[in-house]
Image (cartoon, rainbow, N blue to C red):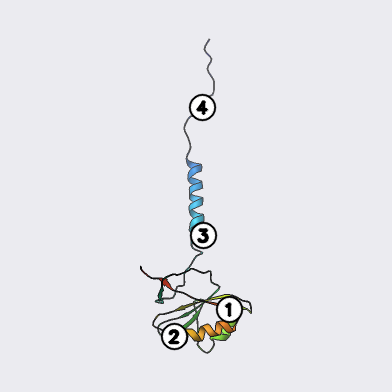
Amino acid sequence: MALESKYKVDATFSMSSMTDIVFLLLIFFMLTSSFITPSGLPVSLPSAKKSKIVMQKVSVTITKDLRYYINDRRVSRNRLQQELQRELNGEEAMVTLHIDKAVPTEYLVEVAGIAAALNAKVSIATKPSNP
């Protein structure tokens, strides 16, 4: 007596659900990686032996030709303190200084003094030096 099933089981594996998952993961990583954006202004940073990346709230940039920027928005030197105070909203925050290495130190000290007077922690952005 031969027993045979009416229903045949297909032994192939469908990869369509696996490709859907891979594409969803690819889209997720592409979207989340674009949230990390470096400062877009062309500044030649000085180098240091140890360079630490800090999450910044406010970025102040001084270019080689002495243009001032707060978070990629150009401001005049006279309005720097008012604009920085408006960005900080009276709370203690981290201000990262992106100063071109050709800029004289007096400008760096002036901006750091303004930020310190506004109760902000000051960090100077550098690029790592080659050993």
* Label 2, residues with CA under 10 Å away: few <14, some 14-19, many ≥20: few
Q: Amino acid at mark 3?
A: Thr
| Separation of marks 1 and 4 at Cα, in angstroms | 69 Å
| Separation of marks 4 and 2 at Cα, in angstroms | 78 Å
First reached walking from the N terminus: tag 3 or tag 2: 3
Q: Amino acid at mark 4?
A: Val
Viewer-closest of 49 and 46 = 49
* Label 3, residues with CA under 10 Å away: few <14, some 14-19, many ≥20: few
First reached walking from the N terminus: tag 1 or tag 3: 3
Q: Are marks 3 and 2 in contact (CB under 8 Å)?
A: no
* Label 1, residues with CA under 10 Å away: few <14, some 14-19, many ≥20: many
| Separation of marks 4 and 3 at Cα, in angstroms | 42 Å
First reached walking from the N terminus: tag 1 or tag 4: 4
Instruction: Give the label, 4 or 2, closer to the camera.
Output: 2
Residue 105's mark? 2
Residue under numbered circle 1: 120
Q: Secondary structure at mark 4?
A: loop
Residue under numbered circle 4: 9
Residue under numbered circle 3: 32
First reached walking from the N terminus: tag 4 or tag 3: 4
| Separation of marks 1 and 3 at Cα, in angstroms | 29 Å
Q: Secondary structure at mark 3?
A: helix
Most distant residue in the right direction: 90
| Separation of marks 3 and 2 at Cα, in angstroms | 37 Å
Height in image: 10 above or below 3? below
| Separation of marks 1 and 2 at Cα, in angstroms | 19 Å
In the image, 100: left or right of 117?
Answer: left
- Residue at the (44%, 75%) spot, across then down: 41
